[in-house]
Image: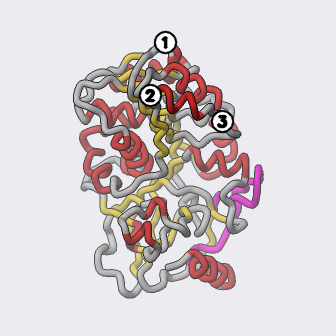
Amino acid sequence: MTKLTVLVYWQMVRATKGVFAMKAVRLHGKGDLRVENVDSPPPPPAGWVRVRVEIAGICGSDIHNFKTGQWISRSPSIAGHEFTGLVTELGDKTDRLRVGDVVAGDSRFWCGTCERCQAGQQHLCEKLGFIGEICDGCFAPEIILPERLLHVVPQGLSPKVAAMAEPFAVALHAVRRLHLQKDEPLLIVGCGPIGGLAAVIAKRLGHKTVKLADKNAVRAALVARVTDAVSVPAESSHCSAAIDATGSISALRGLIAATPAGGRIAIVGISHGTLEIDPNMLVERELSLIGCHAFQQELPEAISMLPACASQLLQLVEAEISLDDVPAAYARIAAGQNEKLKTLIKPS
């Protein structure tokens, strides 16, 4: 289904009254987030599925879109793309899922026909959109999505952990992009959700030396305790492999300056502003800046890793809130006031 087709479909949805009203958090524009009563989604069309959302997560990119409006393609749109829930209804031509399955969502909405999609790089799709942007998202009791974007999670897994599948896949992709050697130290700058999850993953994959740097000392200490990593000042660490998960231009600039010759930096943070770089410095020091956009095929592997990491992930949860509390949570996260990493929403 192309991006244009999806937009046309959602125009039809708006013209079709749902059977029940529900509460939802909708982004109307830059800086304009509202908790509203809306119609529940209509019956899912062919190839789509209805899911009752059990737990949703607030992502840094949600905050970025709220602050900048960078990815607003339809308005208003129910926000949110990290979630787990229960399949309650199947549209025609669905053959993989069953009513009652517990699933996690793939945030990426790709076309499936462009050159990148055909090469298995759906995260680089020429028409890529995301749940909560191209279609209504998960900050609501119900959501309807294409079956292809839903993956069954292991039985008995805590919904709070299952809701982290999507950001866990993002962090896994960033770690994989570095192609770390077995005993190579890793520096993670930024102990927000993605940086913290990257530390969990690196340790789970057997990388012994993981260093953490974050201006929020409480949060850095938490991640260090949970993962048995070491908290250090970024400018004093000389690791040849690093992940920037800050979204801060100044932090990235400092990391580039501190990375030794021949080093690699995987950039996964969503930044505000632009970075001036002297290309001669990259040439002379042979530094590699590696972009990390969402994830490629890592989501199933990420889901399979969740049970073994569940106890660690639960320690990273900041709060579990209602839909009414989401605007205040956005403000708190944007101000960097969280002491832990992940704010979760229980829509019901």
- Nearest to the observer: residue 136 or residue 286: 286
Q: Residue furthest top?
A: 236
**Colour scheme shown:** secondary structure
For marks 3 and 1, give the one nearer the viewer: 3
The residue carrying mark 3 is: 275
Q: Which one is earlier in the sequence, the residue at label 1 or at label 2?
A: 2
- Residue 6 colored magenta? no
Kindly identify the residue that appears in the image at 58 percent across and 69 percent down: 135
Label 3: state its secondary structure: loop
Residue interval drawn in magenta: 24-41
Numbered label attached to residue 236: 1
Magenta span: predominant SS is strand
Which residue type carries mark 1? Ser
Kindly identify the residue that appears in the image at 33 percent across and 23 percent down: 185
Which residue type carries mark 3? Leu
Q: Is residue 161 above or below residue 296?
A: above
Is residue 240 among what the camera can see? yes
Label 1: state its secondary structure: helix
Q: In this image, 43 relative to 21: left or right?
A: left
